[in-house]
Image (cartoon, rainbow, N blue to C red):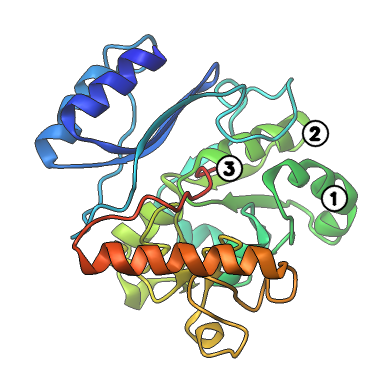
């Protein structure tokens, strides 16, 4: 499957990342409309993929440097082998119904993303677990369960993530812990930002995405953050004004944690990227983490 899918993408001129695991297939790809449809048609012929859900957005420039197809144990790593996000998933809530759910005082709203993603933007009154990776979420929930549920007669737990994949696993985890009123945002933050008017939105800030756009806003318009090429963290407009920010070399999150040798290497990479840009070429020297 891996070689066939990669070959199809390369032939169509598609770039991006596709992850394949026993629990399903997930990824983000970019290319012309015809090329994307050709790859999707091929994916739908694969076992269990006929009804695959697809989200579309447009960008003026190619947001990826290369094409990768990876085989993984889990699409996003939680480290809970007994969790089945297909069989035990919580209740899906459409973007159009999400505001009503999270406005209910009995609803506990949890952002399941990593701390650096939450820093770029999140929903009003959402709880930030401040976890460095999704693998840390189960332990965080178990440690904080009593505090989260305290004082709630009929607690409802609503969770969200970028595209909905992590929440499928998070809701399955909570159901395995004996909680039934568990909900998650169908299509994730991206579908909410695509479908909901800014005037009605409960979203604050921007949404980190795992490609060269870095963040997006309502209507999936490109946001104001840039990517630190040293630590791969999103950098806000305020942090871009910091004396600790040097394009391609450091940012407030990693300044002082890199050696002089590393900084020289980053500076050379940045110089080569600038030269490539001046020639109108893409510099293949950056790689973003996989989208969980």
Crowdedness near tag 3: few (<14), some (14–19) or many (≥20) residues, C-alpha within 10 Å: many
Q: Identify residue for label 1.
A: 145
Q: Looking at the image, which residue is at 36% across and 61% down?
A: 213
Q: Looking at the image, which residue is at 19% across and 62% down?
A: 280
Q: Looking at the image, which residue is at 61% across and 54% down?
A: 113
Q: Identify residue for label 3.
A: 167
Calculate the distance from the C-alpha at mark 3 to the C-alpha at mark 2: 15 Å
Question: With respect to residue 102, does 288 lie above or below?
Answer: above
Crowdedness near tag 1: few (<14), some (14–19) or many (≥20) residues, C-alpha within 10 Å: few
* SS state under label 1: helix
Instruction: Assign the C terminus to one quadrant of the image.
Output: top right
* SS state under label 2: loop
Q: Are marks 2 and 1 in contact (CB under 8 Å)?
A: yes
Calculate the distance from the C-alpha at mark 2 to the C-alpha at mark 1: 10 Å
Question: With respect to residue 73, does 250 lie above or below?
Answer: below
Which of the two labelled residues, at mark 2 and mark 1, occupies the earlier sequence position?
Answer: 1
Q: Looking at the image, which residue is at 74% across and 75% down?
A: 256
* SS state under label 3: helix
Visible in this render: residue 109? no
Q: Identify residue for label 2.
A: 177
Q: Estimate the x, y position of residue 222 in percent, counting from the top left.
A: 32, 68
């Amino acid at each position: 499957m891996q070689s066939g899918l990669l070959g199809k993408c390369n032939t169509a001129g598609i770039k991006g990342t596709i992850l394949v695991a026993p629990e399903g297939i997930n990824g983000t790809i970019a290319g012309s409309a015809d090329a994307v449809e050709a790859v999707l048609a091929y994916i739908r012929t694969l076992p269990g993929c006929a009804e695959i859900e697809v989200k579309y957005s447009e960008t003026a420039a190619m947001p990826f440097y290369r094409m990768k197809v990876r085989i993984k144990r889990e699409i996003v790593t939680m480290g809970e082998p007994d969790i089945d996000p297909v069989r035990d998933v919580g209740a899906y809530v459409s973007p159009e119904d999400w505001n009503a759910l999270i406005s209910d005082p009995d609803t506990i709203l949890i952002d399941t993303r990593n701390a650096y993603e939450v820093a770029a933007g999140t929903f009003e009154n959402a709880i930030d677990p401040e976890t460095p990776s999704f693998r840390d979420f189960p332990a965080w929930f178990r440690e904080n369960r009593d505090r989260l549920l305290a004082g709630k007669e009929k607690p409802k737990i609503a969770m969200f993530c970028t595209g909905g994949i992590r929440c499928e696993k998070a809701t399955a985890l909570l159901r395995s812990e004996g909680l039934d009123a568990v909900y998650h945002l169908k299509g994730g933050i991206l579908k909410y930002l695509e479908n909901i008017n800014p005037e009605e939105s409960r979203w604050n800030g921007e949404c980190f995405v795992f490609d060269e756009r870095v963040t997006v806003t309502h209507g999936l318009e490109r946001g104001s953050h840039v990517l630190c090429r040293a630590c791969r963290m999103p950098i806000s407009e305020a942090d871009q004004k910091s004396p600790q920010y040097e394009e391609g070399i450091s940012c407030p999150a990693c300044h002082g944690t890199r050696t002089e040798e590393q900084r020289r290497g980053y500076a050379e990479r940045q110089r080569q990227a600038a030269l490539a840009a001046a020639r109108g070429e893409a510099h293949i020297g950056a790689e973003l983490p996989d989208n969980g």
